[in-house]
């Protein structure tokens, strides 16, 4: 079964605006998938529905075969999410922010601490672990959210514009890191981006979304062959 399967996904916001017009999408296990499109296309809305942050108007969403309407609590265990906006308490300590995640997933502390430490090392946040998150640069905060999202070893990692506003050097190191967890740990990754370059260099499949519709769903190889 696919890591993510979406059928007929529609979203009409409270003001009557139709942000999604019946989207179908499958992302296979182990894939690295980019949802590519201009601002306002419906990328965040789509991810918001998958993460159960946005209530859908119609359609079906399954995560590893689990219908999110039937059992989001169970689907959630497979899911790690890195939202676009920083949503941690800036006054909290970096290590505690990552560890708190373990609590939500019922991870024992004996397992949580080494996991948190290894993530903070891998994401170059080790030196900052005992300080307040407020002291981190934008790129470090972004990496902190990635560390937190990976804490419970999700099989599907979803990132909303992970490298927006991140300088080119850091962007490359984040790309390397995402490639590594996709390749070495088999984590399925879905990210949204409006950079074609990012989608091309990182991903195997690309869904192009515009005005709430998927206008193209193809492999990067095929897309490049056409250019
Ligand atoms: P829903 O229909 O899902 O309940 P709402 O229409 O009530 O969503 O809006 C939720 C929030 O999003 C509100 O705080 C609203 O101000 C904000 N919002 C409204 N329009 C937009 C927009 N075009 N882009 C982003 N956020 C918006
Ligand atoms: P993207 O992530 O591709 O930039 P979004 O999913 O954020 O696009 O937004 C898709 C469309 O829905 C945009 O036109 C946006 O203004 C609108 N929108 C987003 N959130 C809301 C909201 N809460 N209420 C009304 N319209 C919204």
Image: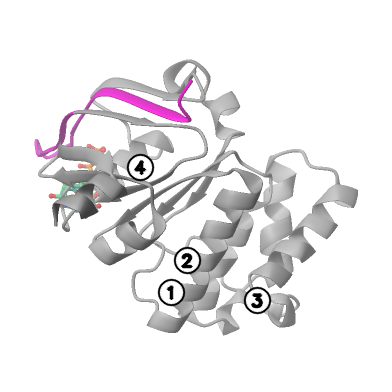
| Coordinates of residue 86 in the picture (x, y in percent) | 46, 65
User: Is there a contact, CB below 8 Å, between mark 2 and mark 1?
Assistant: yes
The residue positioned 39% from the left and 40% from the top of the image is 53
Distance from mark 3 CB to nearest ligand 2 atom below 8 Å? no
- State the residue position of label 2: 175
Q: Which residues are magenta?
A: 1-22
**Viewer-proximal residue among 158 and 54:** 158
Instruction: Give SS at disc 2.
Output: helix
- Mark 4 or mark 3: whose residue is earlier in sequence: 4
Q: Which of the labelled discs sits on residue 67, or is there none?
A: none
If you read the primary sequence from the N terminus, does the residue marked by circle 1 or circle 4 appear first? Answer: 4
The crowd level at tag 1 (other Cα within 10 Å; few <14, some 14-19, many 20+) is some
Q: Position of residue 120 (x, y in %)?
A: 70, 68
Residue 149 is inside the magenta segment = no
Label 4 CA crowd tier, 10 Å (few <14, some 14–19, many 20+): many
- Are the residues tagged 4 and 2 within 8 Å (C-beta)? no
At numbered mark 3, what does the secondary structure look like: helix, strand or loop?
loop
Which residue in the rendered view is the most extreme toward the right? 110
Q: Please name the residue that numbered disc 3 is placed on.
A: 124
Helix, strand or loop at label 4? It is helix
Quadrant of the image occupied by residue 148: bottom right
Indicate left or right for 20 with 32 as reference.
left
- Residue labelled with disc 4: 47
């Amino acid at each position: 079964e696919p890591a993510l399967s979406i059928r007929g996904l529609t979203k009409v916001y409270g003001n009557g605006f139709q942000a999604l017009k019946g989207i179908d999408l499958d992302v296979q296990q182990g894939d690295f998938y980019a949802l590519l499109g201009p601002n306002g296309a419906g990328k965040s809305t789509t991810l918001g529905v998958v993460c159960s942050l946005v209530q859908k108007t119609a359609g079906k969403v399954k995560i590893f075969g689990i219908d999110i309407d039937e059992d989001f609590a169970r689907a959630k265990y497979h899911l790690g999410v890195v939202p676009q906006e920083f949503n941690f308490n800036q006054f909290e300590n970096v290590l505690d922010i990552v560890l708190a995640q373990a609590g939500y997933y019922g991870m024992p502390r004996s397992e949580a601490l080494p996991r948190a430490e290894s993530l903070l090392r891998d994401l170059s946040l080790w030196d900052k672990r005992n300080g307040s998150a407020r002291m981190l640069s934008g790129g470090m905060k972004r990496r902190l959210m990635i560390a937190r999202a990976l804490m419970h070893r999700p099989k599907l990692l979803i990132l909303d514009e992970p490298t927006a506003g991140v300088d080119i050097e850091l962007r490359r190191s984040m790309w390397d890191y995402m490639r590594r967890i996709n390749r070495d740990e088999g984590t399925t990754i879905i990210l949204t981006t409006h950079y074609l370059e990012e989608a091309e260099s990182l991903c195997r499949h690309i869904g192009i979304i515009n005005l709430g519709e998927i206008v193209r769903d193809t492999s990067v190889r095929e897309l490049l062959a056409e250019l």
